[in-house]
Amino acid sequence: MSSDAMKLTVARIGRAHGLKGEVTVEVRTDIPEDRLVPGEEYETEPASAGPLTIAAVRTQAGRWYLRFDEIVGREAADAARGVELVIDGEESDEDDAWFVHELVGLAAVRPSGEAVGEVVDLLSMPAQDILVVKEPNGHRAMIPFVEEFVPEVDIEARTVTVTPPYGLLSGEEPEATGETRS
């Protein structure tokens, strides 16, 4: 395997929790219960922060909390904030899984090809992920990242096709009724 293989982020370390080195993590995988398990070792981004080995895992109210063998105490936990746990891209076994770095910068278009804006982020929310599209006027539209509203992601064409419900995009006109205006 080449060392320049694409790295995929499984989780990003958030705030320290308590005094013993436990941290919250922002999950970036569809299968956290398979990936975030005690004994699992992860490379990190930046690489100098790792590798990190998961010592303990717990979830509470939809949040994930991890402890690592290498992070002991609140100070070390605070220092690890923002570090990403990464795997080699070839290891990904998630179907239709998109990663933030793959989506950011893609053009958001309607099925007709009309440009809507540019993807600037992907937010992980409890119900589903949210695609953040920056429209030309600067407005940020939050589009639920579900097949109904984002039917196609074409990495090669650098586009994301969106069919958001009425009102999510700024400046939308109600659909024309076929009447002519004078």
Image: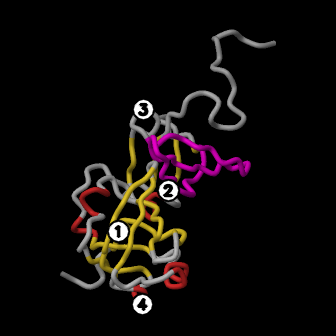
**Which residue is tagged 3?**
148
* Amino acid type at image mark 1: Leu
Disc 2 from disc 3: Cα separation? 19 Å
Q: How crowded is mark 4: few (under 14 residues within 10 Å), some or many (20 or more)?
A: few
Looking at the image, residue 33 sits to the left or right of residue 118; the answer is left
In this rendered view, identify the residue nearer to me: 36 or 55: 55
Q: Nearer the viewer, mark 2 or mark 3?
A: 3
The stretch in magenta equals 116-145
Disc 1 from disc 2: Cα separation? 18 Å
Tell me: residue 181, above or below residue 55: above
Please give the name of the residue rendered at 30% of the width and 79% of the height, measured from the top-left corner: 53
Q: Does 22 appear in magenta?
A: no
Per the image, label 1 sits on a secondary structure element best described as strand
Q: Which of marks 2 and 3 is nearer the N terminus?
A: 2
Looking at the image, residue 149 sits to the left or right of residue 42; the answer is right
Per the image, label 3 sits on a secondary structure element best described as loop
In this rendered view, identify the residue nearer to me: 74 or 101: 74
> Percent from the top left, x then y, of residue 16?
53, 72
